[in-house]
Image: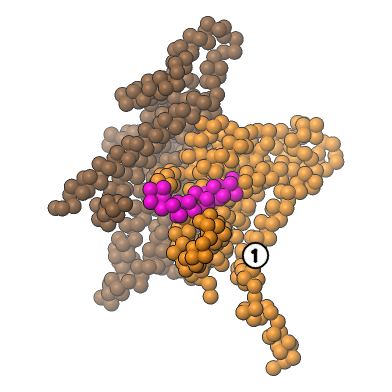
Amino acid sequence: MHSEPRLTAYIIRRLMQSAAVVLAMSVIVFLGLNVIGDPVYLLIDPQADQAEIERTIRRLGLDQPIYIQYFNFITNALTGNLGTSFVHGTSALKLIVDRMPATLEIAIAATLMSIVFGIPLGLYAGLKPDNFFSKSIMATSILGFSLPTFWVGIMMIMVFAVMLGWLPSTGRGPTATFLGITSSLFTIDGLRHIAMPALNLALLKISLVIRLTRAGTREAIHQDYIKFARAKGISSSRIVGVHLLKNIMIPVVTVLGLEFGNLVAFSVVTETIFAWPGMGKLLIDSIQSLDRPVIVAYLIIIVLLFVIINLVVDILYSVLDPRVRIGEKSA
Amino acid sequence: MSVTDVGTVPTPAARPAAQTPFQRFVADFTESRLATIAFILLIVTMVLALIAPWIVPQNPYDLAQVDIMDSRLKPGTPAASGKYTHWLGTDGAGRDLVSAMLYGLRISLAVGVMSGVIAMALGAAIGLIAAYAGGRTESIIMRIVDLQLSFPAILVALMLIAILGKGVDKIIIALVTVQWAYYARTVRGSALVESRKEYVEAARCLGLSNARILFRHILPNCLPPLIVVVTVQTAHAISLEATLSFLGVGLPQTEPSLGLLISNGFQYMLSGEYWISFFPGLVLLMTIVVINLVGDQLRDVLNPRLSK
């Protein structure tokens, strides 16, 4: 019972730290963006007269001192209003939220792919380490780490879309609603569209899962519970499928959870290659057109996402391993 | 026993005890044939990038030498002027791809190496200060390091580019900001281990100044892990710069790096003109893989736990 208030205190302290991070990031991002470029001249017709330029400046609030602009921004942010896009003329937050399902869809598909491909391959490489096929798996996984994602994506388009014509090269397929979730994963054409981008995004994670699974298998195979199961005469497939796999899955699932935010960030690249209409592509387009409210809103949302993921992982760890909290206390 | 056997035994190479540390290092490194080939390729790549202006048939940045009528020629087509052959074809602007790639390689390597060196100097200094100062300074520095490493590099770089704008200097700033934390963490870790060793105590007893102990005694002993991080992070910097350029938020069009060449060729990919993206990508890939292979071998050789 003694540890309960301590855990609560730890969670509260971590929450406050996270809030401070988000606030600091918002200041840095907002100030930084206001120092470069003048979006007024990017958005107004060069033929426009002085009066019209000034009207626009006033309409966008760009004539106010910078601290007032930030103050307006932060009060709006707290009420869920992250500014209005200069280019689209609609709420920046709404623009991003509208694009979010497409990004989450591709990130989830990539995570599933890394499990489906990574675990069996890693298991095989761990069980038969000296096999030629295992060695090729490991060599390929090194390539997975060092190949630049965007180039692999281009090559995939070249082979599967241009040369073979099997898959569509760009865009997202039609969506369908299933169990209240609307996603392009539920239509055949949607699956054809998502296959390449998801695989492209998953490549790095597949390599990671292969290595984790292989290392876990190599370690577990010499442990007593496996030897004991063998001695009891349990079939090999049951030992691997039930006993071994259960123990390997813990680190794999933890790492994949942690890496989910990374997938969302990296989808910026994949979405640009495959013209996937997600948040990442919106960010790149907004950087190109200096659409500041959208950039700021995207960054704040992604920082929020990361802070939440880190927070959840930290808290889970502290629940599982009390030493983390004690270390924190004495520091 | 034959005469030749007797003759070879006393040579220095056969007696490890007589080797200088550098000779031992070379011997250990060349044990892996793959790493040796990678190292040779790396040297060749760097030399090619350095001497590019003197060996390429065309200066791809000089508009007077580039003929737009030559654009998107297939590999092996002779130039309209008839003076040379475009062995790897031309890009959308009519630039000879071999020339453009070597110039691009120059920029990619320069940006990668420069940001790697600056990040290393900065990160190593901060890491040393953290390890030496201890207490509050150390925990603040390490908090910042942890915070930064919890965000993916591409995201931090994109944020900075969104804030700073485009340009070679901006890209280098972004890459340094992304990478210093790795160096700081590595150096702090090994500096903490080193500072508890007896030679540091001996140096203190001799009355040497703190700065001298830090930079002349502790830092050199932190070098092995630092060298490994430098190679891996330089490869990472090259890849990241290429990615940013591909996204169109990296280097300016006037100085295309490999990433930008790939990006420019991407629009022709769908009409089957693969070579504009394919060859620069191959060079980029080779550079990154080669640096990583050298780094892997360095890690094995420099790891004291693995030394015999």
Instruction: Specify start and end residues of the magenta stretch as a single range.
Output: B115-138
Q: Nearer the viewer, residue B93 or B107?
A: B107
Q: Residue at x 22, y 48 (%)?
A: A7
Q: Is residue B223 above or below residue B74?
A: below
- Total tally of numbered discs in the picture: 1
**In the image, residue A42 lies at what x, y percent?**
55, 19
Q: Which residue is mark 1?
A: B36
Residue B88, can we see it? no
- Mark 1: secondary structure: helix
Q: Chain of mark 1?
A: B
* Scheme of colours in the image: by chain
**In the image, residue A320 lies at what x, y percent?**
25, 55
Q: Is residue A114 left or right of residue B253?
A: left
Farthest residue to the left: give it. Answer: A1
Shade of chain A as shown in the rendered figure: brown
Mark 1: which amino acid? Thr
Q: Tag 1: Cα neighbours inside 10 Å, few (<14), some, or many (≥20)?
A: some
Query: Would you say residue B136 sits in the magenta stretch?
Result: yes
Residue A208, can we see it? yes
Shade of chain B as shown in the rendered figure: orange
Q: Nearer the viewer, residue B207 or B2?
A: B207
Q: Indicate the quadrant containing the N terminus of chain B: top left, top right, bottom left or bottom right.
A: bottom right
Q: Tell me where residue A208 sits by quadrant.
A: bottom left
**In the image, residue A201 lies at what x, y percent?**
47, 45
Query: Would you say residue A83 sits in the magenta stretch?
Result: no
Name the chief secondary structure element in magenta.
helix
**In the image, residue B185 lies at what x, y percent?**
46, 53
Q: Is residue B43 left or right of residue A79?
A: right
Q: Residue at x 37, y 37 (%)?
A: A21
Q: Nearer the viewer, residue B298 or A232?
A: B298
